[in-house]
Image (tube, grey):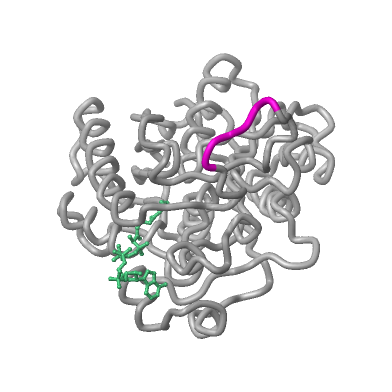
């Protein structure tokens, strides 16, 4: 009995960019990208596939699965770091696009951990008011925030959106809890400046432009340790073990990070949902896209306990548990 995910949905841009396509843009090879990241292709937005448009399509599918009308929504949260405007939020655009006339809406910035932060927040709302229906979306068009001349980053990221409708159920299922963290002291290792300040008296130092800058190796090390610690801490607190978990849905950062995590937690291959080869790292969208795929391919059954874990810029990281 408690907060449940009533429906999920996802939407990927039409255009698929392969590693061979990237060989034509930067000094890289399919072999390097595949062996270092496990990524073979990613979807890249074009035309009017803005973050909010992908979000709205994902949301419509989630609402349909949930059997909830858009006008029943109380709150829309879009976790993103790549809204097509700074104001209004992507959430407000989604609210208008899907006709959620009774919802208030805002964006959440927690990079790759945004969806888990959003679900945790939705849980608090639902606990306060069992009638609440909340749409949590993780969506990115990071292709608009990439330096396409930087081979360290442009090969990694992809675009897409995933959505979940959150509500209350009297059944045995529900949100078990989370273990979420942030550490702003390490921001430099993975960051993206805002556009240049127009205030001549306020200069932001070292503004390298509004695109992603990453110290890959350092991020890698922190990501593995942080996700492992978050998972262990959460399981210990909830008095569960990995044997109690039916499926792990991690942030799809990089296959080597996921393999290290599997190794450290001694997770069997079939307990971890991985789709990074087809989508790359879609930041806040990666977990909800994977969740939707897992749900629609019957990898999650009623009664299953699903474990999520994430790591991203901020740094932000965490783990959460839901009994289906
Ligand atoms: O959501 C969290 C976000 N971030 C991540 O998950 C990223 C975490 N980090 C990583 O995934 C890895 O660090 C990368 C995939 C980014 C890089 O792999 P790496 O094994 O750590 O490589 P590296 O940065 O240490 O670079 C090794 C070499 C360098 O050449 P030299 O200096 O040894 O001659 C790089 O210049 O590989 C070179 N390199 C490339 N070569 C071909 C870097 N990017 C590329 C590339 N193609 N795309």
Image quadrant holding the N terminus, namely top left
Q: Which residue ends up furthest to the front in the rendered image?
A: 201
Residue 257 vs residue 302, the one in the foreground: 257
Left/right of residue 142 with respect to residue 218 in the rendered view:
right
Q: Residue at x 76, y 28 (%)?
A: 103
- Residue 182 included in the magenta stretch of the image: no
> Can you see residue 64?
no
Up the image or down, 163 lies above or below 182; here it is: below
Image quadrant holding the C terminus, namely top left
Left/right of residue 216 with respect to residue 199 in the rendered view:
left
Q: Which residue ends up furthest to the top in the rendered image?
A: 128
Left/right of residue 238 with respect to residue 82 in the rendered view:
left
Residue 243 vs residue 67, the one in the foreground: 243
Up the image or down, 267 lies above or below 168; here it is: below
Q: Which secondary structure dominates the residues rendered in magenta?
A: loop
- Residue 205 included in the magenta stretch of the image: yes
Among the 4 quarters of the image, the one containing residue 166: top right
Relative image position of residue 139 (x, y in whole percent): 61, 49
> Can you see residue 122?
yes
Relative image position of residue 99 (x, y in whole percent): 84, 40
Q: Quadrant of ligand 1?
A: bottom left
Left/right of residue 39 with respect to residue 121 in the rendered view:
left
Among the 4 quarters of the image, the one containing residue 189: top left
Relative image position of residue 27 (x, y in whole percent): 46, 79
Q: Residue at x 61, y 61 (%)?
A: 143
Q: How many marks?
A: 0
Q: Which residues are magenta?
A: 201-206
Among the 4 quarters of the image, the one containing residue 80: top right
Up the image or down, 42 lies above or below 196; here it is: below
Relative image position of residue 270 (x, y in whole percent): 27, 63
């Amino acid at each position: 009995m408690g907060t449940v995910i009533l429906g999920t949905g996802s939407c990927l841009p039409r255009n698929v960019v392969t590693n061979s396509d990237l060989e034509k843009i930067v000094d890289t090879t399919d072999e390097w990208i595949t062996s270092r990241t496990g990524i073979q292709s990613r979807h890249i937005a074009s035309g009017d596939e803005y973050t909010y448009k992908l979000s709205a399509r994902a949301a419509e599918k989630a609402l349909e699965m949930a059997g909830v009308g858009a006008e029943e929504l109380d709150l829309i949260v879009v976790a993103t770091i790549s809204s097509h405007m700074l104001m209004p939020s992507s959430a407000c655009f989604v609210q208008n696009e899907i006709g959620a006339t009774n919802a208030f809406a805002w964006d959440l910035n927690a990079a790759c951990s945004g969806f888990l932060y959003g679900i945790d927040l939705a849980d608090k709302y639902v606990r306060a008011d069992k009638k609440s229906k909340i749409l949590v979306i993780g969506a990115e068009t990071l292709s608009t925030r990439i330096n396409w001349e930087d081979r360290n980053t442009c090969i990694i990221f992809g675009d897409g959106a995933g959505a979940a409708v959150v509500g209350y159920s009297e059944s045995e299922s529900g949100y078990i809890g989370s273990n979420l963290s942030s550490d702003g002291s390490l921001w430099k290792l993975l960051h993206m400046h805002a556009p240049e300040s127009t205030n001549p008296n306020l200069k932001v130092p070292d503004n390298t432009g509004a695109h992603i800058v990453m110290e890959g190796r350092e991020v890698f090390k922190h990501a593995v340790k942080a996700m492992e610690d978050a998972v262990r801490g959460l399981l210990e607190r909830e008095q569960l073990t990995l044997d109690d978990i039916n499926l792990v849905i991690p942030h799809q950062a990089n296959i080597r990070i996921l393999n290290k995590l599997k190794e450290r937690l001694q997770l069997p291959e079939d307990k971890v949902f991985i789709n990074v080869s087809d989508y790359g790292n879609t930041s806040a969208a990666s977990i909800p896209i994977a969740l939707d795929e897992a749900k629609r391919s019957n990898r999650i059954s009623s009664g299953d306990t699903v474990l999520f874990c994430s790591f991203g810029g901020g740094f932000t990281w965490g783990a959460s548990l839901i009994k289906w």
